[in-house]
Image: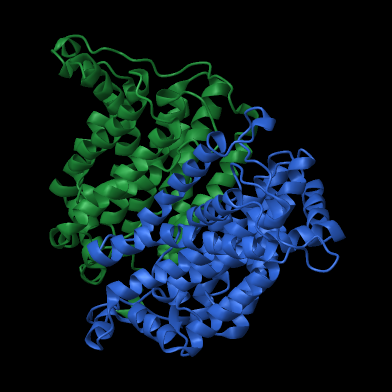
Chain colours: A green, B blue
């Protein structure tokens, strides 16, 4: 493989990975508070379709992004009501949300399937930085939302691990009883974390339909929400490692499609399987060092908190 | 959350979950879901009236719809049983969709390999093919969980995408029917690869297989030592391990059985309904099966009526499609029904008591962190 080809794979890998990065970082925020949000896939779909529709009406991609974020957050609020207030099982609730969202987005997007968007996010080379050999083309000749991820990922890491807000959020995920006894609101924290996480998922979806593959196709997320959930485990609940992992997973996705252009005789169907199989293989590999990983996981992940049952 | 000094709600756990409340919750969930979706339809300008009328006609409201409802309930019984068997051990098999596709794949491979075999033998071999296809697909996440400790939720789900792509590949390549000029359809099955009908109805004999499967699974789970064993493992892995039960072996066995059940669903669908293999053989039977199993509280016998109800929903979306009405509303409805049922479960397991004064701040004791959520303990 020529070095030119490798660079193009990474350029596409960053773009493909950015969706996963947004979604995974959002999931990390939710999981750090103790809520397993399995509805990411659905929140991404909601973000994708609303982002696309608003951009189509208003010809303003940034308003589309804002709408996508709101849609993701709105669905996340629904999830929070069920799992935080009504203590519903987090696995079933997440699945119900995905099924609901597939139906809802299919319904809302019915009239715009395959319609090209009026405006999209274009690639902008950052003057100076884009001229750095190799890395410049890979990292600094992308679209504005990729640059947004460069800001949001470290910012999230900073908030989670270097501020009191982050400490409080993590303590709710580790030991809700102690956090409650210390006067923190478990319910309030979890609501906030889930809704912000959903906003990230909505952003991930809007990125897909406005920048990565500007269009609306039913179910266009194609399992990326689930891959993002796997990525969270891979990243041991750290936003920075999630970014690295996201670009790695994105590059695998990009690699498949490049292989075809160099004339490799593999059916498109098998190439399309690669991201899913790669994710499963990675999950298995990281399960082997599962002691550290179990320590990294928020202790109260997946459990509802009832003050009455302390 | 409320003003200090006023009446505050407190949740008090019921000693026994309220059965009456459980039935009421299911009914209210169903009605509320239709009300919410109706408001949504009105608000988005499509009108709830015509949509709901078409859904009724397409399902319970006509003899044709009734037969279609039963036909859709059959694969749902299988996928829901698959979910229920795994959940008995507190494993989440959300890969019944993929196991269903692989069951169809296995049965089809047999049907194309030996189209001239006598019907009973060929059908028997296809059942075996379906069981094996589904079981192998369930074995992958099962073995990963058993031997590497990989949580099964994400792998079972991702394998759905792989299974669908595999069938897509076959119907676009090796199995494609040249007569369809490039459509992703397989060649029609031979006469002897098609399940007979029940009496003079439009319902195929897969119905008997589905009912038998529900009965057998019910008996195995509630009346055999193995059924008890996997329940113990699910409830308390450590205790089961001390009792000498092999956890990995039973995880693998449960996932094999779970996958085989979903695979049998795929077999009866291609052999009884589609009569060939094609892309999109399932309108999400694997996912709807999760909802069916959850609402039936993972009880094999309750799954049957619940599958009929959701079978009606699934076929009503076909009617909507033919009339050009928004069929996606049916998926939304499925989700909303489950939302309401999940929220209502709180009132099945807890009583809401209004008390004056502040909530006491008792010293904290470790929460029951390892217990499964109260709404999801499998029915006994």
Image x and y of residue A117, in percent: 53, 19
- Quadrant where the C terminus of chain A lies? bottom left
Residue A102 lies, in percent from the top left, at 55, 45
- Visible in this render: residue B7? no
Residue B275 placement (x, y as % from top left): 69, 50
Q: In this view, does B63 lie to the left or right of A295?
A: right
Of residues A1 and B28, which is closer to you in this image? Answer: A1
Residue nearer the viewer, B361 or B150: B150
Image quadrant assignment for residue A147: top left
Residue shown at the point (57%, 62%) measured from the top left: B125
Describe residue B159's horizontal placement relative to residue B317 as left or right: left
Up the image or down, B28 lies above or below B97; here it is: below
Q: Can residue A12 be seen in this view?
A: yes
Residue B261 place in picture, x, y as percent: 52, 66
Q: Residue at x 39, y 41 (%)?
A: A224
Q: Which residue is drawn at 55% across and 81% down?
A: B218
């Amino acid at each position: 493989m020529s070095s030119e080809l490798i660079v193009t794979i990474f350029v596409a890998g960053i773009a493909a990975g950015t969706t996963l990065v947004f979604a995974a970082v959002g999931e990390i925020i939710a999981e750090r508070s103790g809520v397993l949000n399995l509805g990411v896939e659905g929140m991404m779909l909601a973000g994708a379709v609303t982002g696309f529709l608003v951009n189509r009406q208003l010809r303003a991609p940034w308003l589309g992004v804002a709408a996508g974020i709101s849609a993701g957050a709105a669905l996340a609020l629904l999830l929070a009501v069920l799992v935080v207030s009504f203590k519903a099982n987090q696995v079933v609730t997440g699945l119900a949300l995905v099924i609901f969202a597939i139906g809802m987005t299919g319904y809302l997007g019915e009239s715009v399937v395959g319609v090209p968007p009026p405006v999209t996010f274009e690639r902008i080379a950052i003057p100076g930085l884009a001229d750095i050999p190799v890395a410049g083309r890979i990292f600094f000749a992308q679209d504005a939302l990729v640059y947004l991820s460069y800001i949001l990922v470290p910012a999230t890491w900073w908030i989670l691990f270097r501020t009191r807000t982050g400490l409080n959020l993590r303590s709710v995920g580790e030991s809700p009883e102690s956090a409650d006894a210390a006067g923190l609101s478990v319910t309030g924290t979890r609501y906030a974390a889930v809704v912000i996480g959903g906003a990230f998922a909505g952003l991930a979806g809007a990125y897909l339909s406005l920048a990565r593959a500007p269009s609306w196709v039913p179910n266009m997320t194609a399992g990326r929400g689930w891959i993002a959930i796997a990525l969270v485990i891979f990243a041991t609940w750290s936003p920075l490692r999630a970014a690295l992992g996201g670009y790695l997973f994105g590059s695998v996705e990009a690699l498949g499609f490049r292989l075809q252009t160099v004339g490799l005789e593999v059916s498109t169907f098998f190439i399309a399987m690669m991201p899913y199989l790669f994710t499963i293989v990675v999950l298995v590999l990281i399960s082997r060092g599962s002691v550290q990983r179990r320590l990294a996981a928020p202790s109260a992940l997946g459990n509802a908190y009832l003050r009455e049952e302390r | 959350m409320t003003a200090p000094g006023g009446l505050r709600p407190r949740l008090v756990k019921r000693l026994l979950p309220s059965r009456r409340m459980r039935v009421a919750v299911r009914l209210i969930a169903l009605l509320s879901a239709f009300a919410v979706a109706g408001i949504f339809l009105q608000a988005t300008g499509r009108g709830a009236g015509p949509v709901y009328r078409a859904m009724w006609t397409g399902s319970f409201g006509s003899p044709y719809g009734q037969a279609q409802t039963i036909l859709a309930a059959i694969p749902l019984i299988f996928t829901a049983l698959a979910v229920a068997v795994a959940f008995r051990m507190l494993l989440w098999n959300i890969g019944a969709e993929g196991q269903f596709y692989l069951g169809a794949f296995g049965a089809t491979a047999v049907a194309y390999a030996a189209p001239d075999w006598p019907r009973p033998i060929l059908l028997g071999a296809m059942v075996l093919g379906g069981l094996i296809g589904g079981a192998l697909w369930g074995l992958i996440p099962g073995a990963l969980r058993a031997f590497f400790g990989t949580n099964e939720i994400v792998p079972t789900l991702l394998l759905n995408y792989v299974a669908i792509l595999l069938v897509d590949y076959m119907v676009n390549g090796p199995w494609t029917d040249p007569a369809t000029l490039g459509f992703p359809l397989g060649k029609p099955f031979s006469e002897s690869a098609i399940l007979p009908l029940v009496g003079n109805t439009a319902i195929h004999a897969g119905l008997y297989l589905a009912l038998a499967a529900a009965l057998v699974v019910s008996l195995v789970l509630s009346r055999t030592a193995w059924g008890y064993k996997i329940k113990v493992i699910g409830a308390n892995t450590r205790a089961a391990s001390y009792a000498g039960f092999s956890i990995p072996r039973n995880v693998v066995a449960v996932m094999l059985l779970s996958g085989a059940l979903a695979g049998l669903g795929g077999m009866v669908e291609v052999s009884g309904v589609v009569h060939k293999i094609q892309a999109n053989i399932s309108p999400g039977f694997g996912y709807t099966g999760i909802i069916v199993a959850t609402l039936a509280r993972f009880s094999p016998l309750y799954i049957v009526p619940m599958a009929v109800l959701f079978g009606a929903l699934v076929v009503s979306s076909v009617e909507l499609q033919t009339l050009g009405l928004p069929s996606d509303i049916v998926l939304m409805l499925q989700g909303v029904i489950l939302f309401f049922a999940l929220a209502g479960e709180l009132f099945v397991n807890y009583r809401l008591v209004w008390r004056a004064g502040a909530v006491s701040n008792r010293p904290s004791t470790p929460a029951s962190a390892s217990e499964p959520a109260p709404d999801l303990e499998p029915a006994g």
